[in-house]
Image (spheres, helix red, strand yellow):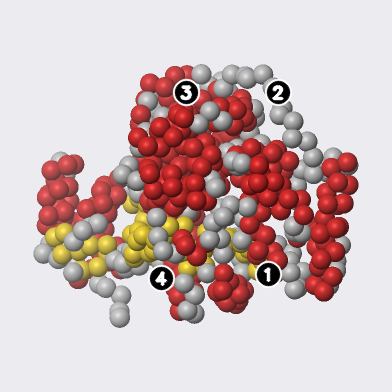
Amino acid sequence: MSFKKEQKPAGDTLPEMRLLLGCARGDADPGRLDEAIAGIRDWEAVLQAASFHRMVPLLYWRLRDACPGTVPANVTERLRSRFEENARRNLFWVRELRGLLDLLAGGGVAAIPYKGPLLAEMIYGNLALRDFVDLDILVHERDFPAAREFLRRHGFHSAVDIPPGYERAHLKYKGEEIFVRHDKVVVELQASPLPWYFALPLDPERLWDELQPVRFAGKDVQTLSPEVLLLILCVHGAKHGWYRLDWLCDLAGLLRAYPRMEGPRILARAEAWGAGRMLRLGLCLVQQLLGSELPPSLRESVAADRSLAALRADVERRLLHEPPKPITTLASLRFQVRALEGVLPKARCLARTVLMPTTQDWKAVRLPPAFAALYYVIRPFRLLREMAGGRIDHPI
Amino acid sequence: MGIPSDSDITMDSLVTRAPDQVSCNLGGESVMLNMKSGVYFGLNPIGARIWELLERPMKVSAIRDVLIREYQVEPERCVKELLSLLGDLHRARLIRKE
């Protein structure tokens, strides 16, 4: 497993990314958007990038007001069609989420929805402006088996092939399980919003003390507070090396929608979670790339962190200078380790990732639960073999 | 409960959005979904403006006045189209009478 830094020369921002950045910056810079539109020669590349970065709604929203003739009519029409299809799909998913929450509540399972359509309401006040692909629902760990059973009884099946007897181990490692239904509704049922292998000392039960009501689909729904959500978005982005622009849009949108968030409290929580650098990196990126205004204490904290420059350069290279593609597993692990502070957290993250068995191990070698301890030996050998064969590009 | 009839909505009716619906702004137009029936309903820009006004309870006559002022429509035609739309929304259980 190599942790050498890749040295690549910085390139120019791709024209399609210049346009998407202009859209993402909102109304702050209309001149920049016009300039970006004028620089587009390949609108197919724009559409592909917008799809990859889940920016079709925001792209359509900004381009519909562009000067006539600057955007080809067929491009606007394709965007409009996809925008409206996404809007209808989002309304359908809201309906399904409301139904699931009522179902779980009726069965005595407390559930907190967050991100997905709630985030669209919180940051845009318009369900049409966000492209999401699953419904995140957080439950107490003790309720997870019951919640899983409710979903199964209502047509959902696990998207992950977890051998019988390994459900607890999977939940411990990932903190979640993904369920899908025949009509393609996807639920990410979580006992923790952060994976255990990340080795951040977060107690998910504490999140239940900091909920806040949001008006959603005609009801008041309890969800994570903006301060907690801000930190979770930063950790999530760091987990994936910030390879998608819509994640930055979410963060910028949250800062814009909740300008009075208390910076000192956010900083204190970030330190308690061991996620200070991840927080500062996320804030640095939205500040530099999307022109976000930060509360003074957060702004000062970002300015004082000299370690961010290299991480930021890495993100910008991947986001802006290279054609869109997901980050590789190894690159993402390397980024996660660099985004952690201190030798112990880095070592813990690496150790847990390398040693803790996952579904990939259980699939590769089927052992009954009584022999589960053998996976701690099997896994490192399997990873080494896959690295040697150059096959380590998938989830490990 | 039976399906609401056209005559349920008059100029003196106080109307607002029903609780079991969700909607979004398509940039000039709107689309809403009745969460119980699963039926979608789309509105053109004037319909979307009416929908926006219905976020809070409003008398139908007050909605008429806003439309006449903002769109310079002929009053008789405005009333006819407004009552027709509100009747459709009421039947679809997307709005309710207070």
At x 74%, y 64%, the residue is A161
Does A326 sit left or right of A376 as displayed? Answer: left
Does A52 sit left or right of A79 as displayed? Answer: right
At x 34%, y 65%, the residue is A219
- Residue A228 vs residue A51, the one in the foreground: A228
Does A253 sit left or right of A237 as displayed? Answer: left
| Mark linked to residue B36 | 4
Q: Which residue is mark 1?
A: A168
- Residue type at tag 2: Gln
Q: Which residue is mark 3?
A: A37
Label 4 near label 3: C-beta < 8 Å?
A: no
- Residue A51 vs residue B6, the one in the foreground: A51
In three-dimensional space, the C-alpha distance between marks 1 and 3, rounded to whole angstroms, equals 51 Å
Mark 4 packing: few (<14 Cα in 10 Å), some, or many (20+)?
A: few
- Residue A328 vs residue A47, the one in the foreground: A328
Mark 3 belongs to chain:
A
